[in-house]
Amino acid sequence: MESLLHYTWKHRLFPLTPLTTTGGRHVEVIDPGMENRNDGPDFFNAKVKIDGTLWVGNVEIHVNASDWYLHGHDTDKRYDSVVLHVVATADREVMRTDCTPIPQMVLQVPQHIVDNYRELLDADRYPPCYRIIPDLSSLTVHSWMSSLLYERLDQRAELIAARYEAHDKNWDDALFCTLARNFGFGTNGEAFDEWARRIDFRAVDKHADNLLQVEAFFFGQAGLLDEATVPAYYHDALHEDTYFQALKREYAFLAHKFSLHPMEATMWRLLGMRPANFPHVRLAQLASLYHEHRISVSKLLTATDKAAITALLRVEASPYWDTHYTFASTPSAPMKKRVTDSAVTLLLINSVAPFYYSYGRRKDSERYCEQAIALLEQLKAENNYIIRIWTDCGLLVKNAADSQALIQLKKQYCDRRDCLRCRIGYEFLKREYGVDKS
């Protein structure tokens, strides 16, 4: 109930009846103030007229007036600046620390807002606000989608900045770790994240011109060269697999030289995955990417268009993987294990664009932030169940910028039922008429 009181106050969705204090004085809300999500009063710098006198200060909101004392506000000087206490039930008067009374107003949440909110919370389909989508103005949709996109890029920029700090402020390492994370394509994202944290790139650099040694680094640190992690019936095949044995010998040498410690191989998932997405194949592709020096911050920043960036990521695994998806597996029909166009597109969306944005923020350069947005606007929208549901509701999704915004909407708002912070939720809640509830 308190969240709805906050919402009603913030958006000034007041009943049509005159507003008065519990003492009968007339209240006019000039400005509800700035919402505070941290400790302290709920709204800062509100402006209210009480019987014609303008008061500028803070506003506190509670369901019951007695919550003022339950929360200890009567002894907290931060609340002495409260000029109006807004409540659903005025079960007692409230005082500041100096015992001066605070004007108090009962605010009833309009019934249609309560009903609409319950409908959103109780809906058994996604999105719960689907009925209002066709009625939204293009301005409302565009502004909200734009905000969601920047919100998503901000979150990802923070993760990339953390990688930058963790790797001694080396942008190339942060870029490669970001790509590695997204080479997991969801299922193995966490495993690739853990793997990348265990890679000593300065050690790899000493052997970067030797592809077999780079692969030994990568597979060894992934824990995939330990025969104990492979079913016993594969052991004979492993012993006869000259490539696997060569990797083992190289890793033993490198592990001793650089004091390497591999991750737990149990983190990797293969069940239910397409073979082309097996971690073995993806690690081999990453090794080729690193060995060929295809990707670096300087190359990324000087790439002039989407085609140039795409060319940097179109890499293929070494020849062994033409006929394998795991070590010692039965050889398959020969096929180059290239990073496909669809995979490249996902890497551009989830790695390159956020990296541009993070780099731009760190360097205080609007150019690279704008480049991130421009890249997303050039790419096709993702085709997944989240996007299909929104398009089925009538929302136009033109490109990857739109699809990223909608993914952010679902994960950060819809999944949390945080409709009170959503602009579409706002449009749904405030409507008293014109929505067919049949």
Image (tube, rainbow, N blue to C red):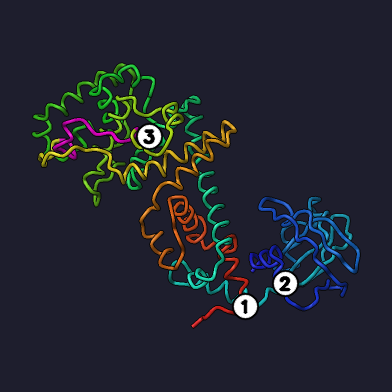
Residue 252 place in picture, x, y as percent:
24, 21
Q: Nearer the viewer, residue 80 or 294?
A: 294
Q: What residue sits 33% from the left and 47% below the top? A: 187
Residue 432, label in figure: 1
In the rendered structure, does residue 321 fall within the stretch colored magenta? yes
Q: Nearer the viewer, mark 1 or mark 2?
A: 1
Whether residues under marks 3 and 1 lie with C-beta atoms below 8 angstroms apart, the answer is no
At mark 3, the secondary structure is helix
Quarter of the image with the N terminus in it:
bottom right
Q: What residue sits 30% from the left and 25% below the top? A: 292
At mark 2, the secondary structure is loop
Q: Is residue 426 left or right of residue 384?
A: right
246, above or below 22, in the image: above
Residue 218 place in picture, x, y as percent:
29, 29
For disc 2, the marked residue is 14
- Give the mark count: 3
Q: Is residue 370 left or right of residue 251?
A: right
At label 3, which amino acid type do we have? Answer: Ala
